[in-house]
Amino acid sequence: MNDLKKKSRAICILGMHRSGTSAITRAINLLSVYLGEEKDIFPALDYNPEGLWERIDINGLQERLLAAIKRTWDTTVPLSAGWQNAPDVRPFRDEIIALIKNNFSGIPLWAWKDPRSTIFIDLWKDVLSELGIELSVVFAVRNPLDVARSLQKRDGFSLDKGFGIWFNYNISALRAIKNIPTVFVSYDLFLEDWERELRRIGEELGIAWPLDDAVLRDKMNSFVRRDLRHSASTGEDLKEAGAPLPVRELYALLQRLLSGEPLNSWANNAAVERLWDSFYSYGSFYRQSMTELWERKETLRLRDRQLAEKDRLLGQKDKQLAEKDGQLIEKDGQLIDRDRQSFERDRQLVEKDSQLAEKDRELAVRGQKIADAERRLADREQRLRQIEEEIAREGMLVEESDKRKDEVIRRQEEELQARLNEVLAAKAETAQSRDAWEEERRIYERRIADFLHSWSWKITAPLRAVLGMLLRQKR
């Protein structure tokens, strides 16, 4: 705590939503005022592309604080007197103390911005005072008609509701910061001439302008653009739009503060108290209704969260079912692939079976041919055996026949020789019989020649040749 007292000074950028607090906060940050690390800051959003420049932890804390006191950021009813000291708020006071010690201890000059702080500034003021931290305020002001139109476009609120939220935020803040150094800044003038307004802020808060401001100018010129302002209404426009009188009076008071009048002047202080008293008194008419409305809305939000959780669970189940369907489809695909592969294998097997059957048929044909060949060979071998047997028999017959013929010839020759001898004998006996013998001899020689030239002798010639060959092979 002592370290915070010695070294820390805080700046709070207050202002109603859609009043330019983001642009002003970034400008102050570029004057070397610490907001936090990049991870601590909200990223840009669609409705605020240049960035919110709010701390995530402070925004979350104040959202929870709103829920604890049964309010929402768009409340149009002032908080109860002394709300910051209620038992339900005490844990948030301790949480703010811890947040400051953990994130800003030892930081000479730091700042924070969250439009919700505009209605919670009493709590922050008390905590910072307890910690001994000097507090200054930069108060962003914008025509309530422009704010209401912006909320109408972004959130669908009616202009009357927009006026009510704007009034609640601004009157609550003005009443709380009476004794705090405050610089009032017009959003419209800031967009018109950011350098003049930022120099004024720096001078009033004691923040030095950088000696080399090239980087500052480059970033500010790209960050702050006139096209960020979509409307710039006047007091007359506000009246013509039907804004309630208290809204117009409060805006007129803010205009005077922008011109340099002190907030603590008797007239301005009296105006704030009068507007606050009326607002607070009339607000009591609606406080219970707003609480009941908040509870109903909270019940609906709880149901919405439950439905959202159910939807999430259903979504998970749908996702799981989709994943299972995908798995089933994948398995079906795998089965189809397997069936296709099986079909292909079956087709290949059928083709192989057909090929094997064809080969079997070819083998059967070949076997039949071989069997026929073997049968023919056997027939041929049997025929050869028969031929050999016939040849053998015929050879024996030829041999026997030759023997018989040789015997016959021999006997005939013997008979002829005997006859010849007889003839010779007879010739010797008688010369007269010579002619007869010669004639007889010629007859016998002719008979022998006829025999040798006979058909039976010739037809047996091949057999005699085969027989002679077989006899030679045997030898």
Image: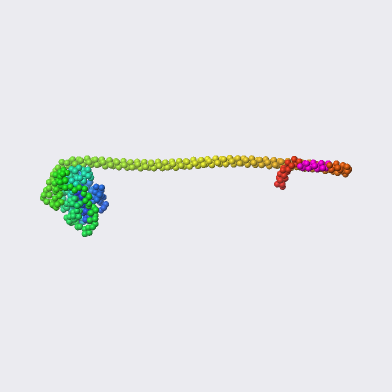
Tell me residue 134's x, y (percent): 18, 54
Q: Is residue 97 visible?
A: no
Magenta highlight: main SS: helix
Q: Is residue 322 visible?
A: yes
Quadrant the N terminus occupies: bottom left
Give the residue furthest to the bottom: 211
Figure coloring: rainbow
Give the residue furthest to the left: 266
Tell me residue 243's x, y (percent): 16, 44
Q: Residue 93 versus residue 353: which sits nearer the camera?
A: 353
Q: Is residue 443 magenta?
A: yes
Q: Is residue 208 magenta?
A: no
Q: Residue at x 26, y 53 (%)?
A: 38
Q: Picture quarter containing residue 386?
A: top right
Q: Residue at x 44, y 41 (%)?
A: 340
Tell me residue 140's x, y (percent): 18, 50
Q: Residue at x 60, y 40 (%)?
A: 372
Residue range in magenta is 440-453
Tell me residue 3's x, y (percent): 21, 56
Q: How many marks?
A: 0
Q: Picture quarter containing residue 312?
A: top left
Q: Picture quarter containing residue 371?
A: top right
Horizontal relation, residue 433 to residue 326: left or right: right
